[in-house]
Image: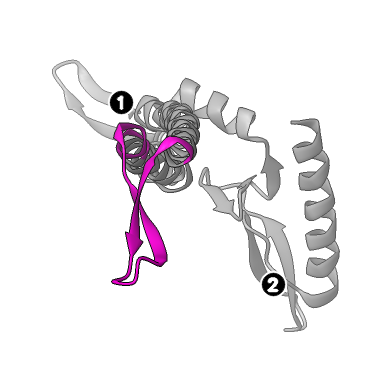
Amino acid sequence: MKRQIVISVLFVMCMSLLAQNYDVVMPGQKKVTKTDEQGKQTTEIVTDDDSDLIQYRGDYWYYKGQTMTEDEFVAKMKAECTPAYEKFMKSGKLKKTGLTMAIVGGAVMLAGAGFMIGGAATADHINYYNSSGWYTGSQMVPNWAMFTGLGLLIGGGGVFIGGMVVTLQTAPDCKRKAHRIYNSQCANKNTSDLTMNIGFTNGGIGLALNF
């Protein structure tokens, strides 16, 4: 985790330097063009503090122009967006399940390879001779160990591949969906609009504030 934080800080420093030199807009920032009294226009890049959206680029999280650690994003989802938090936590469970499947599948494949090697070493052979009685070769007779090993290789390979798909594809997809859920359902939902209504009531003129 510390290594990831150091890499994130270095990445942000490099990107900030590029932004200053090449006028690049970072995630969570925006360009603002201002015109002074003489009509001269200047453009500057400022933090988009009005937006509660979280950007996700290349396994890095950005919020209001600053990087977030994954732990900070998880804590924000847990406090403000239950659907996104649940989806994100599902990605962690899927990753653990996928890794477990891959490990178990790999172990079964190794066991199958062992059965295949042992079966081949102890298998019987059929010898062939020509009409003159000269030996021309032999053919291995598969035994139960070889058939068992082949079955374990096929079954273990299927479990291993399935585990890798869950780990490398399904689990990260859940994480991306959690990010989309937060931005679409929960971002900018914590601030309410304040409106003022003035109207007549039985007692006279009334003032109402709506949140």
**In front here: 96 or 3?**
96
Q: Residue at x 82, y 69 (%)?
A: 18
**Residue occupying the far front of the picture:** 132
**In front here: 131 or 167?**
131
Residue 158 visible in the snapshot: yes
| Image label count | 2
Q: Position of residue 125 (x, y in %)?
A: 37, 47
In this rendering, is residue 181 above or below 40?
above
Please report contact status of discs 1 and 2: CB closer than 8 Å, yes or no. Answer: no
The residue singled out by tag 1 in the image is 208
Q: Residue at x 51, y 46 (%)?
A: 53
The secondary structure type at the circle numbered 1 is strand
**Sequence-first disc among 1 and 2:** 2
Q: Position of residue 204 (x, y in %)?
A: 21, 21
Please provide the residue range marked out in magenta.
121-149
The residue singled out by tag 2 in the image is 34
**In front here: 52 or 121?**
121
Quarter-of-image position of residue 156:
top left
Confirm whether the magenta stretch covers residue 144.
Answer: yes
Indicate left or right for 184 with 17 as reference: left
The secondary structure type at the circle numbered 2 is strand
Indicate the quadrant containing the N terminus: top left, top right, bottom left or bottom right. top right
Q: Say which amino acid is labelled 1.
A: Ala
Indicate left or right for 44 with 171 as reference: right
Q: Residue at x 86, y 64 (%)?
A: 17
Q: Nearer the viewer, mark 1 or mark 2?
A: 2
Q: Residue at x 85, y 74 (%)?
A: 21
